[in-house]
Image: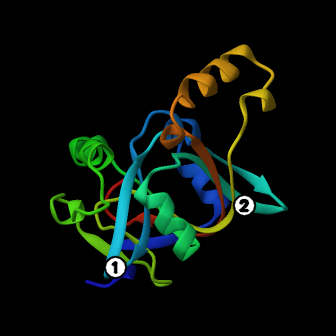
Amino acid sequence: MQFSDLFKQISTKDICAGFDIFKLVGNDFFLITSGNKDNYNSMTGSGGGFGMLFRTPSTWCVIRSDRYTLELIQKEKTYTLSYFTDEYKDQLIFLGNKTGRGTDKMKEVKLTSVQTPSGNITFKEAKLIIECKLTQITMPHPNDFYSQEARDYLTEAYKNPSDYRKYVFGEITAIWENNIKK
């Protein structure tokens, strides 16, 4: 089955009309995936956002600095954000709890990997796919924030260097909606 049989390309305007963006980034489980068909890894995303950066439709997400997926994003300079219906919640939790460094957790999951026309890896079961080209990775410092809640969060998160959070920004290069799952 061809990728175009499974997914249709939509615009950034269509994503705003067809999906609740705050539900996507605040409630729905999603996977961040990078690599190539021979070596890729996914992790569960939690939080993030969409907007304009340098006059370009963009995404951002937060990834712990020790995650293997982050290493692959830095190497490949591309990644996908794949959103799923609740029926795949257990699979996404599994991918968030098990490392892909030194193991092949991707073979243990019951999701079907597919390549987008540009070669990025995603999954046939996704309801929405956002392809991204890496724009920037930065690490915020607690003093960069003015709300006490944000400072407290980062201070707690930065107890160990491996827990440092990186903010990953990417230009949206394509958006795909599943022809069957919505």
Left or right of 145, for residue 87: left
Of discs 2 and 1, which sits in the foreground? 2
- Within 10 Å of the Cα at label 1, are there few (<14), some (14-19), or many (20+) other Cα atoms? few
Please provide percent x and percent y for residue 111: 22, 61
Q: What residue is shown with label 1? A: 5
Above or below 49: residue 114: below
Please provide percent x and percent y for residue 5: 34, 79
Q: Secondary structure at mark 2?
A: strand
Identity of the residue drawn at 50% across and 59% down: 70
Specify whether residue 175 is in view: no
- Sequence-wise, the earlier of marks 2 and 1 is 1
Please provide percent x and percent y for residue 117: 46, 84
Specify whether residue 119 is in view: yes
- Front residue of 41/7: it is 41
Left or right of 67, for residue 135: right
In the image, which disc is placed on residue 80? Answer: none
Tag count in the figure?
2
Outermost residue on the front side: it is: 160
Amino acid type, mark 2 = Pro
Identity of the residue drawn at 71% across and 40% down: 140
Left or right of 41, for residue 91: left
Kindly indicate the quadrant of the structure image that contains residue 48: top right
